[in-house]
Image: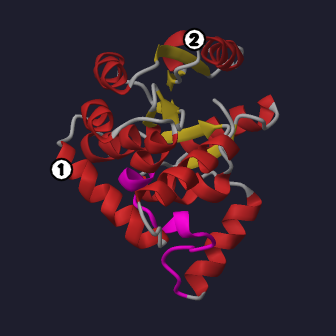
Amino acid sequence: MRDKEKHKVFIVDDHPLLCRGLTHLINQESELEVCGTAGEIPTALHAIEDCDPDIVTVDITLGGLSGLRLVEELAACRSDLPTLVLSVHDESLYAERALRAGAKGYIMKTEPSENIIGAVKKVLGGEICVSETLGTELINKLMSKQSVSLASPIDQLSNRELEVFELLGRGMKTREIAEKLSLSVKTIETYVDHIKKKMNFRDSRHLFMHAIQWVMREPSE
């Protein structure tokens, strides 16, 4: 197959080694080629505009920020461009969030290489790609008219609240989080108040303790 007939894949991942490995894996396919990579959201947005890919793979954690933010932005400005979230984080927390944000699929990095390539091709073909387990869960929820799974209190947090919760767990102060997310301190304080109420934390100390514990349980990307 000639190069011009290949589907262009753009990879967004802030780990160079993983990025190189995924690039090699994709470029081995006769109908796929990597047209660019980025490790940060602003860089990715500019590069995607320049190279006009057919699909974007997005990591969940990008330079300490949530990859869901990029999925949302691409869904808003490039609704014709499918995104596939590729992450080490368990789908039980992030997969449904990713789909609601606009992603067309979610697959774990621990999956065999043929499954990852299969997911890319499936999304390129216009299909939604999720695991069989998640697919069954979503169908059951649809049949029972449940909009959101609340298996744990953290599921009640919005994507932005979850992002703040994680940064608090990484030891960042309110002002530092505001600077990192390009938001006002007052906005971050509002998010913190929402987190307290939704997760029934007694006070800020209780919140910080649980945020640290949650981050420590999460796999490192």
Considering only vertical position in the picture, is 100 above or below 153? above
Dot 1: element: helix
* Farthest bottom residue in view: 144
- Which disc is residue 186 wearing? 1
- Amino acid type at circle 1 is Lys
Report the front residue among 71 and 206.
206
Quarter of the image containing the N terminus? top right
Label whose residue precedes the other's in the sequence (1 or 2): 2
Name the residue located 34 percent from the left edge and 56 percent from the top edge.
Answer: 192
| Residue 58 spot, x, y in % from top left | 51, 33
- Amino acid type at circle 2 is Arg
| Residue 220 spot, x, y in % from top left | 66, 32
- Which disc is residue 142 wearing? none
Name the residue located 77 percent from the left edge and 38 percent from the top edge.
Answer: 115
Q: Is residue 161 magenta?
A: yes
Report the front residue among 155 and 81.
155
Q: Residues within 10 Å of mark 2 (few under 14, many from 20)?
A: few
Q: Residues within 10 Å of mark 1 (few under 14, many from 20)?
A: few
Whether residue 127 can be seen here: no
Report the front residue among 190 and 220.
190
Which residues are drawn in magenta?
A: 145-162
Labels 1, 2: front one: 1
Considering only vertical position in the picture, is 49 above or below 118? above
- The residue beneath circle 2 is 2
Dot 2: element: loop
In the rendered structure, are the residues bearing label 1 and label 2 in contact, judged by CB atoms less than 8 Å apart?
A: no
